[in-house]
Each structure stands twice: as structure tokens, then as C-alpha cells.
Image (cartoon, rainbow, N blue to C red):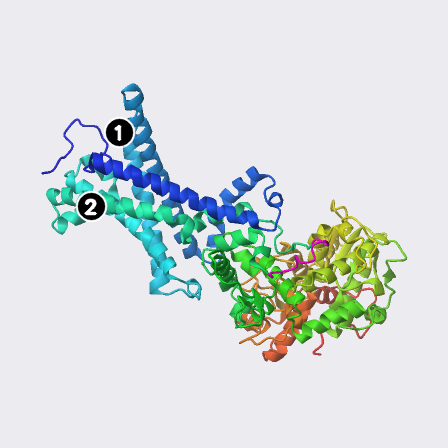
Amino acid sequence: MAFPLQAGEPITRPTMWRIGHTGEVIFYYLAAVTVAVFLWGVYQRFNRYTDGSEDWFERMDNLGGRIVSAAKIVGTNEKQFDRDLVGGLMHSFIMWGFLTLLIGTTILAIDMDFLEKGGKLLTGQSYSVFHGDFYLSYSLVMDFMGLLFVVGIGIALYRRYAIRKERLRGPNSSLEDDLFIWSLFLLGVGGFVQEGIRIVAMEFPDFETVSFVGWFVADVFTVVGMDADMALFLYPISWWSHALLAFVFIAAVPYAKPFHMISSFANVVARDEKAGKRLPGIPADLDADTGAESIDDFSWKEKLDQDACTKCGRCTSACPANNSGRNLSPRDVILDLKNYREHVESGGDESEIVGSGDDAVIQAETMESCMACMACMDACPVEIEHLKTFTRLNRQLTDEGELQPSVQDVFQNLMQKGNTFGDSQRNRGDWADDLEFDVTDAREEEVEYLWYVGDYPSYDDRNKKVARSLAKLFEEADVSFGILFDDEKYDGNDIRRLGEEFLYVELAGHHVETFEDCEFEKIVCTDPHSYNTFKNEYPEVDFDEFADDPMMPFEYEGQWNEDGEIEIYHWTQAVEEMVENGTLGLNGTELDYTVTYHDPCHLGRYNDEYEAPRELVRATGCDLHEMPRNRDNSYCCGGGGGGLWMELEEEEKPSEERLREALQDTEAGNAVEKFVVACPMCMTMYEDGRKTGGYEDDIEIVDVAELLVEAVESKGVTAGTSASSDAAPADD
């Protein structure tokens, strides 16, 4: 027999309806056990991080501000929408639906256990608010957000099982992933099923129309033959099924994939805004702390990264190495390390963490494939710092001498000659011999701009032309600039990412000692790699630690540019100021080429500089068309992270794919005449890709500086030019 609400009864719904006193006791007992298991599991998980090697305080400064910022990032799902609108909507529906249902359940528990039962126990009076307008508003919000939750889960199921989205699959996919998504689905749908059964059992109280989803489900049940008596029988079954599933899910959170709901937020709170662009150093007195000999060598943040990974595959999807057929999936590196750590923690045998052996957790080939482009980190919605972990693995490979011969040759060149080419340092300034003016020696004369030219513009024939173009621009703008000639060495950026930390420190020490002996106002760099390491990494090196090390041939002590007193520029930033001041005399009509521009990783993703090079291209009068992947979504040329020196097998070079994109996917299509770069490594990689990809007759590779010089020359005013100007690129 049904028990409908009678006229005049309050607008509410019964809680613990038809459960009975014994059922209530069992429910509260199971709830207490669930909470205890949950809290113990969370404690155990976070307690493991205390064994990490990194100082907690480095990540916990301004904790309140960090939490607020993390709440914004997580709450807005801003990274979930990047490159995947449907995925962003799906995750927003799931997250906000889940949080609303959790908050709603908490409100109900507070009302039922404290305001109602607690009030009656203490004062003999109920203080429940779960009736009237509050109840109606509560029911409407819960049904609406619950519906979004189920829709989000439905989209997730469709993407995983129907279209089988590739980035959601992989060697680390497991039954646990399936159980997680189906548990959420059953929790969401089960709540509406329970609500529909209750509405049928209570014979459709009019006010319950506000529970529009539950009302619809109840209508469906009546259509298939459910009456009030059947609903009364089924209600306790559905109630207990839903409750038990919720208890199991909550208790399992710290021990399975759902833990990412906690660890991901913690990971965003603990993020380093300069992660990747600024790698962690190695204290001089910790000779053993150089890599990944043991899983215990990993910092607590690296372990938290592993636990925060949701297996979404966005990092792997964005990775140019993976897309070009190299053996690298950033997601799987993080997850393989997590699986190995859990294996060791559970008493399993230890293995080589990274190496060429069959039993190595991470293969050396995998690490060799990384371009250090930071696309994985930029795509990650939970702020995993892949490059920090990858650098640790690379340091281990370097310590063990597991390097490609070509990379060993580069290291040898640096140790013996100070540059990656192995050429004499005396020849470093020879690129300037063809200029019709002298370049100032910054060691002997005060200058405004100390220009760090870099290895490739100094020794590579193609990039020497870029250096000469830039020198002409400085001369035309009448700025005071000078170079270090043979005291300039390689900056160290990419060998650091390959794991050679102590050689990097030696190079850094040499340069800051040399800088200290010069008088200048600003440093300007040709190469974005140099710009990044001077700006973000040199100031972090505490040279005091190495002061007594006989292996370090420099005398500088302390930290360089600690307060940011010296301005560091990429040359496009410096020249943009000159163009804006009118010192180059450009009016934006000099050239009429149709061009596209490639964002270098170390200038764009690393340092958020996207507009200066574009403004310079526009200043020449060129018609600039963007490729679909631009700015922070730019696709690496393949030269970063030592890729320029590697011999790797790949299905297609990233540079070839990028050139094809320039010719086929811009609005101008094959009308694009010039592919514009602002990085010597990009120049080298794209000149190579133009040949190997068969694009020599289709497109020309030029640097922004070469476009500017051509534009200024068209006015007949460029300083130091001759009839045989080398501003235009050659085919060599």
C-alpha cells in the first residue's frame, strides 16, 4: 500500500525512508568505516611524499595565494578546454556535477544528523531546514547538476568505448579505468533511479515536479508497469544499492584512480610557475644526487606528479616526438614510474630505472626522443612537470655514459673547445668579417647591449647570415652594441636538458664571470635557448656552492643577477623597441611577401613572447598568415633538448610536417612564399626539412632579421650593406 503525502503536509521528503532502525545503525556503522578507511588511505598516500628529496618549503610559500590560484585553475577547467572543446565541456559537467552532488549530500547529512536529530537530542526540537522553499531549490539544483554529471559521464563513455579516442588508450590503460568511469555512471544514474522509484511510491506529489529528472524517470517506470506497491518494495533495494556503491567508491578513492581528484588539486597548488624553463640544480656536495639510480631519488613533487596523472593522454597527444613516430609518450613515462614505485613499495624487486637493458623501467631511447619543447607540460591540465622528471632520468643516463656517440662528441667539443662545433674559439667572431663596419669588443669598451651571438650564428654558415643581418639592424638603429668574441662559449641550455649539469654550471660560471668584467646595460640574445637560460636559469645557480671545487674553473661567487637588475632580451624584443621608436625608418609597406611565422618553443611556450616577432614581420609589410598550430600550441621543429645532435628514427621529421602545414593549412595555402623563424636551431632544422621533405622549390626559410634587413635595404639606408648583401637566404 502506498503512503502519499496528504494535503497540508510539509513540502519535503523523508530521509532513511523504509530503512528501519536496524538499517540506520548499519548505515552509520558503514559510513564511519568508510570515512576511516578514506582518511587512513589519504594519510598514507601523502605520508609517502615526506620521503622525497626536495624541500617542502620551496613549494609552499604563499600557501593561501597558491590555493586560491589553484581553485581558479581547477574550477574554470581552463586547460581542459585547450585544444579540446568537447573534452573541456565533458570534464566541466562531470567535475561540477560531482562537486554539487557531494555538497548536496553533505548538506543533507548536516540537516539530518545535526539540525534534526542533534536538535531533538539537545533541546527536544528539530531545526531542520529541509522543507519548503529550501527543499524545492535544493531538489531543482541537484536534479539539474546531476543531469549534467550523467551527460558528462555519457560523453566520456562514448569517447572511450564508441569512438575509442586514441589518447585515452595505451599500455597503462587498465580495468581500474573502466571501473572508475562505470562507478561514476552508476552513481549518477542510480541516484535518479532511486528518486524515480520514490516518486512513484509516494504517488507523484505535485511539488516533486521540481525534481524534473526524477519525475521523468518515474513517468518511464509507470509506463513500463511499475505501480506504487512495486515501488515500495524496490525502494529499499535501490537505496541500499546506491549507498553501498557510494561507500565503496569513497573508501577506494585513496587506493585507486579516483585519488587524482585529491592529488591533482594538490599538484596544482604545489606547481612551480617556472617549471621546465628553470630546471632544478644539483648541490655541489651531493655527488650521488645526480639522477635516478633509485626511486627514492625522486622528489616528493615528482611522486605527486605521478599520482596526479589522470591518464588523459593530452601530453602524449601534444608531444611532437610521439607524433613523429619516436618512442616517447610523456604520459606513459610518468605512469611507468608510478607503477614501478608502487611495485617497490609493495615489496617487489628493484630494477634499473632508466637504461638500455630489457628490464629498465624507462628505455634510454625514450629519453633521447624528448625535444624539451614543453608541449606536454603546457597541455597537462593538472600541472605535471614532465621536464623535471625527464631531466632526472637524463642525468642518470649521462652519469652512466649511456649517450649517443653524436652527443658524446658534442660534450667533448664543449669541454675542449667551449662550443658545440669543436671549432677554435679564435674563429668565433669571424662571421663579422664580411660586414663593412667593425663590431665592438664588449670586453674593452662600454656598450648598451651586450650581444650574446651563440654557437650556430657564430659557426654555422646559414646562421652566420642571420647574425650579420642582426648586426646591420643594430648598426642602422645606431645603438651601442658589442660581443665577447672568443670569451663567448656555448650557453649550456640544451646540454642541461640532456643531463650534463656540471658542465652547464661550468659554462654558466664562465659567462657570469665574464659578464662581471664588462660594462653594459642589457644582454640581448640571438637564440631563444640562450635567452631562456640567461633569464631563468643562470640567476638560480648558487656559485658559492662550487667556489672550492677544483673542477670549476671560475672565480665568481654568489648568484648572478639575483634581483633582475640586468635586463635580458631576445633580439626581437630589443629590435621591436627600435622599430616602435622609428629608428629603422620602416613604414610597413616595404615588402609584399606572403609569409607564415613559426613560434620557437623557448621564446613562446617557455617565455610567453609571441607578439614581438609578429610585429616585426608586419613592420616589413609582409602579409602574415597563421598556421593552425601557433603561439602556445606551436609544433616543435625537433631541434630542442639535444634533438639537433641526435640520430633518431622517425616516421616523419617534425620540420617536414610543419612545412607541409605551412603550405596546406594556412589561409593562404600554397601561396605562402616564406617560412619565417626567429631561432637559429629552427633555421637549421627547417632548412634540413625543406630538403628531406622535397619543399626546396615550394617555400623559403628566412629569419625575421633577414626580412627586416631586406625591408630597410629597399629604402637604401642600411648600414654596412654591399651589392652582394647576404640578407636573403642561400640554398646551402
Magenta stretch? 283-293
637 vs 513, nearest the viewer: 513
On whether residue 530 falls in the magenta region, the answer is no
Residue marked by disc 2: 237
The residue at 19%/43% (across/down) is 235
- Residue 519: percent from the left, percent from the top? 86, 52
Q: Is residue 125 above or below residue 263?
A: above
The residue at 35%/36% (across/down) is 106
**Would residue 464 be visible to someone looking at this image?**
no
Point out the residue furthest to the top here.
123
- The amino acid on which the numbered mark 1 sits, given as a three-letter code, is Gly
656 vs 5, nearest the viewer: 5
3 vs 675, nearest the viewer: 3
- Residue 398: percent from the left, percent from the top? 66, 66
Q: Is residue 99 above or below residue 506?
A: above
Q: Where is the N terminus found, in terms of image quarters?
A: top left
Q: Quadrant of residue 531?
A: bottom right
**Would residue 553 be visible to someone looking at this image?**
yes
- Residue 277: percent from the left, percent from the top? 64, 55
Secondary structure beneath disc 2?
helix
Residue marked by disc 1: 132
- The amino acid on which the numbered mark 2 sits, given as a three-letter code, is Ile
Q: Say whether residue 593 is left or right of residue 145.
A: right
On whether residue 292 falls in the magenta region, the answer is yes
- Nearer the observer: mark 1 or 2; the answer is 2
Q: Say whether residue 341 is left or right of residue 719.
A: left
